[in-house]
Amino acid sequence: MKINKKTILNVVLILFILSFFVTPIGYYGKIWLNRAFAFSPEIIDKGEQQKITDYDWKLKDAEWNFFNFEKSKGKVIFINLWASWGLPSEAELASIQELYDKYKDGVDFYIITNEERAPVEAFMEEHEFTFPVTYLIIGEKMPIDPSEVPSSYLIDRSGSIVIHEEGISDWSTNKVYKLMERLIAE
């Protein structure tokens, strides 16, 4: 029995597609695809920007200590809502790590999850992320909508939401870096 090139190609294609469902290759392939299709976030026009007016919001830090978001009033703030079990979140966090490494001294970073500490700490260690993790207190009032994960906000010193992205974005772009430099300088 002779097998033609088209049959071989179809078998290889089917095996490749199946690998996305049953092997680690597929997992890393999905991460790569999410990163490949993540674009730089869109900046909201000045006239359409909403303001955060209530900074009285309680959170927990990595050591599980309570603190108030009010400590960031008047500062440039980056907020990301994520989940360690969410593939899109994992794809986005690498670019957030780069942003954090570059601007950690001039921006308050809130990388927020509503998960328990143990799986988050394991996830952070596995991926070698060093940005600070903040834990959401379920039921606590918030100035942002926590229902869309992943989603991100960039807030200027006056409390205006300059960027609000639902889904993943690439935060390590020149466009974002220029905006960050401008916001920090204001």
Image (cartoon, grey):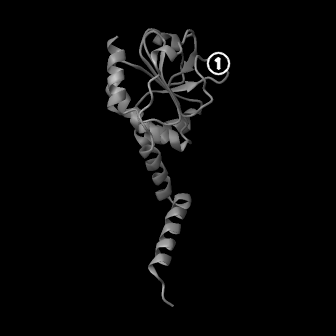
Query: From what the image shows, is residue 143 above or below residue 146?
Result: above
- Residue 119: x, y in percent? 55, 39
Q: Is residue 81 visible?
A: no
Q: Residue furthest bottom?
A: 1
Q: Quadrant of the C terminus?
A: top left
Q: Residue furthest right?
A: 139
Mark 1 residue type: Glu
Residue plotted at (42% across, 12% down): 75
* Number of marks drawn: 1
- Residue 68: x, y in percent? 54, 13
Residue plotted at (64% across, 16% down): 141
Residue plotted at (32% across, 20% down): 181
Q: Secondary structure at mark 1?
A: loop
Query: From what the image shows, is residue 24 above or below residue 158?
Result: below
Q: Nearer the viewer, residue 26 or 35?
A: 35
Label 1: which residue?
Answer: 140
Q: Nearer the viewer, residue 32 or 51?
A: 51
Graded by Cα atoms within 10 Å as few (under 14), some (14 to 19) or many (20 or more), the crowding at tag 1 reads: few
Q: Is residue 42 visible?
A: yes
